[in-house]
Amino acid sequence: MLTWTIWVSFIGAGVIMLMKPEKKDLIRWIALVVASVGLLIGLFCFFTYDLGGSNYQFGNGDGVAWIPQFGIHFKVGVDGISLPLVLLTGIIAFTGVLYSWNIEERLNEFFGFFFVLIGGVYGVFQARDLFLLFVFYEIAIVPKYFIIAIWGSTRKEYGAMKLVLYSFAGSALVFIGALALYYTADLPGGKTFDLDALASANFPVSFQLWALPLVFVGFAVLAGMWPFHTWAPTGHVAAPTAASMLLAGVVMKLGAYGCLRVAIMLFPSGMTANVTLPLWFPAGMSGLVIHHFWSSVFAIIATINIVYGAMVALVQRDFKFVIGYSSVSHMGFVLLGLATLDLTGLKGSVMQMFSHGVVAGLLFAVVGRMVYERTHTRELSELGGLIKAMPFVGGVFIIGAFASMGLPGFSGFFAELLVLIGTWRAFPWLLLPIGIGIIITVAYTLRTIHKAFFGDRRNDMTKWDHLAPVTIQEKVASLMLVAILVIVGLYPPILLNMVDKSSDQFIKHHVKPSISGNLARQ
Amino acid sequence: MPTLSDYLVLSAILFSIGLAGALTRRNTIIILVGLEMMLNAANINLVAFWHFLPPSPTGQMFALFAIAIAGAEAATGLALVIAVYRHYRSVNAEDISNLKG
Amino acid sequence: MNSSNILHVLNLLTPEIVLCGLAFGVLLLDIIFFRSDSVEHRHEQLGCSVIIGLVMVFFIYALQYMDWQNTFVVGHGAFVASRLNTLFKMAVVGLALITVVIGFKTPYSTHVGEYYGLMLFSVLGMVFLISSEDLLMIFIALELISLTLYVLTAFQKGARRSVEGGLKYFIFGGFSAAFLLFGLSYIYGATGHTSLREIAGALQGDQLAKVPMKMLGIGILFTLVGLGFKIAAAPFHLWAPDAYEGAPTPVAAMIATGSKIASFVALTKLLLIGLPAAAGSALSWPTRWHSGWAGTVAIIAVLSMTIGNFAAIMQTNVKRLLAYSSVAHAGYILVAIVAIQASGVPAPSAAPAIYFYIIIYALTNIGAFGVVNAIGSKAGGDDFEHFTGMARRSPYLSLLMLIFMLSLAGIPPLAGFFGKFYLFAAAVQADPKNLGLLWLVAYAIAMSAVSLYYYLKLTKQMYVLPAKDPRRVTSNPAMNTSLGLIGLMVLLMGVFPNKVVERFENLNANPYPIWEAAVPPPPQPEIPVPAPAEKPAVPAPAAPAPKS
């Protein structure tokens, strides 16, 4: 049943694409219906997920043979890790359509590409076959180019091309890794792309040590991992509102999800194995032994993400760039949680994916749609005093920003807390730089709120007197996102229960058997 | 009595001369002559092999067909050169360079 | 089954005979009956008769395909009639049909009869090239294709670039023919045979010691150079952009598709059937790199992918872009050709993957050329600027072009993606234990990531930039339908490739159930090429995996 989220999106894309671009209202309503069908199915499954039942639900069992010559199956299903992300996709798609209500130009093509992207994203989160996952992953790449290049702003063609080429280069790495692991896996049932079967393949550690970084980095490019993050700010800034919401909210999670579901699940020993670096030691001495080599490397890179992203966000002058770099910073928490290979860290990482998805969606909507399209500037120095002119927008942004900082009472708090606990167990020495990163986060968030919405503009306060009022669609969408932030923040178990269950399963089945050291002290 | 290698050396020399001519000359007709020489070098090979290998008519047949094809190729080539000459008033390869990229 | 009965041979050759008759018939019809008619009228009359004739030939092939279970060999392999070959012939005739449709009523010249006649002769050459397993026939068929295509390229006599493209194509093609003939003569001299199967026999086991290896090596090298020209592999690709740009678009389509299919089939057969013993190895340089054609082909593949992709980035003419992209695609296919014999035994999936990919590639390209022709003839040229804003002016054709470009770039769910996956998987499969060819595959995948850039650059012109000229561009219904069908096929073969893959794997698994030489050849050990008996020796990873 959950599979219908994919098909409805693709069919919707086809139908909308074929419609006459002049029938604008009809197109908008159809788009809203398509998005809400996905959202409702997601919600229904979210609330009927059986915590006592099997790990994967709403799927098709062992799948249907698709290309039997290569052991490729159409096998779908969601666990407590992917179901929140499916729901997140529904939420962002729905609010994205609402925030795109004012688009006038080539509306049919816009929503056509939009729903192809959405369908691909739904597919990635539900696929349980590596080939299938890869197919959906690539389907999601190309529409982004057109959405940004046609409907975007600020250096849109450059931003779009950069984004697509980075994603495609990343997926090329994954492709190489997938072919290598497909032929290396020695399974009794024959060659297959089935992720669960591959996870039991026990790849040789020497193979894992080079295949893991290939696949992990390939996916992490899309998660905005430093130093491959540069597509993210330019892409986010260039994209139209709905697309930046999708990019930051969902697409970056595709990358992180791929790291978890493919790289870590198939190559856990690659994460934990020790590596001896034959560094500049004189002959006779053994090289430098690094414990849990790739795990440590990725944890350090994730920390760089957090600190570097926050520092760059602090000095931005463009409102949207601030949010863009803050996304890079927050995705650092997601990657850090994954790199800890610790149950708590993993839970925090999944929570952070969901929470940041909603927060980023909200913030980009405020900046791109509600502020920029009224004031026609994103320069923080030219904004200021907006709170008087647009109290609703200001309020929403402040709530979103607080959630993004990780204040208690919002979803981000639990997420980051869990990641930090996981880090404390695995890499305690990383907490100092992360702490600095969090302080900078507070600083840039407050700076942005101050400059954009309060600020020192007494001499020119009339500037914002004639802004168009906030529309009903914007209000509905914003309130919806704020409500989700607050609900998850005040009552985390609504999400945490299923995340907890599936993370536990994940650690137990895939990570624990291969842990050689005391990386995860459970 | 010349041996097989004598013929092969001859044909190799002929092929090289043809190749050198075709590569270095700018006049398309001379290039055509070079191409024909290369084809005929191959024909010498075929006939020589036919003569020295166990009896079978293949090599000779091969050479006969190759000669016919070389003739057709020369005819086509000259026709194309004439067509080009009508446009460019030249048969010099350097002058014929509208297409670039 | 060896056929020496003349009537049986004629029966086997029915479609070829019909095709030949059609070609002469068109010429005669034009001269005798339509001499005085207007050019347009002649175009209609002759075009329709050619279409009807080709449809007929197509159906005869289809009947043969369904009817046959055995493989028939005429001579020592001068003409081999098998189901696999028939499938390719159907593809070539189908592509010719589409070529005629997309070039319908576009008056390139007043010589209408010759235009269709030459086109049909070229198809005849392709058909014979596909069926031949004999050096002599390969050479004759290749020359038949080339000579007709040289003339067709220069067919728009009034246009400078057409004539110039034709001459350049001719000169490079002439080099290619000379190298090819010289190489073939050495292979003949070294082994004493022209039939591919007998050559393979002469290189087998003890016989190998008697073969002058240096001569054979030079022969193979020269042959590769000659065939490299035909398939437009770098560094022998220089003619391609000029010929594509200069030629009338339908002719360019034919060069890019039909002739490519035929040449690749010939190359694959030559290496797979005739010279498997001389393959050497291109696995993980340098430790397991043995001299043989595999290494040479690997180098050509790397060069083609690099030069094709990077040169394509700089193009501003759509046809030149397609030319360089075809160089790159030749490189991808060569990757799988390297894999055919990479680890001493035939890789089970390599040949089917090559076959699948050339069909996909040809289909996508003929579609792309069809769109270029439709848009180019209305917009006044094939440069990027003529395609600007086409999404507004002709949404249908633009959507099709988008599909074709993304398929060439290898984006799922289009056929090009699965084609590439199949090729690269087959290449890795050649040495699955050590992943010996992964270096080449990794390079190919990286290069195909580069290729997305220029395909998107073209679609950017069509979708992103605003139109300078708001008039709509339309084409005739026949063209729209056939292009739409191609687009649909590209999509369907990408979503459901399993049936096609199954077909190719079956056909390839056992191409020669019955093989008897007409004249008892000198004591000949068993023929090494994909004989079913050898299959179990292969660690058969391509065998359909049982459902897990």
Image: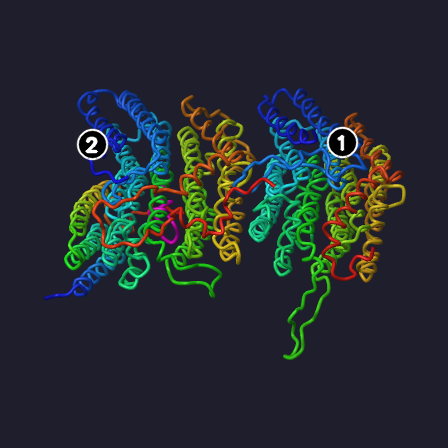
Circles 1, 2 touching at the beta carbon (< 8 Å): no
Nearer to us in this view, A216 or A241: A216
How far apart, in angstroms, are the residues tagged by discs 1 and 2?
A: 70 Å
Q: Position of residue B29 (x, y in %)?
A: 20, 50
Check disc 2 and report the residue beneath it: C7
Nearer to us in this view, A16 or A182: A182
Q: Residue at x 34, y 35 (%)?
A: C89
**What range of the chain is rendered magenta?**
C229-244
Mark 1 surroundings: few (<14), some (14-19) or many (≥20) residues within 10 A? many
Q: Amino acid at mark 2?
A: Leu
Q: Amino acid at mark 1?
A: Cys
Mark 2 surroundings: few (<14), some (14-19) or many (≥20) residues within 10 A? few
Under circle 2, the secondary element is: helix
Q: Chain of mark 1?
A: A
Tell me the mark number nearer the camera, choosing from 1 and 2.
Answer: 2
**Where is A150 relative to C524, above or below?**
above
Under circle 1, the secondary element is: helix
Residue A45: image tag: 1
Quarter in which the N terminus of chain A is drawn: top right
Taking the magenta stretch, the answer to whether it contains residue B30 is: no
Q: Chain of mark 2?
A: C
Taking the magenta stretch, the answer to whether it contains residue C239 is: yes
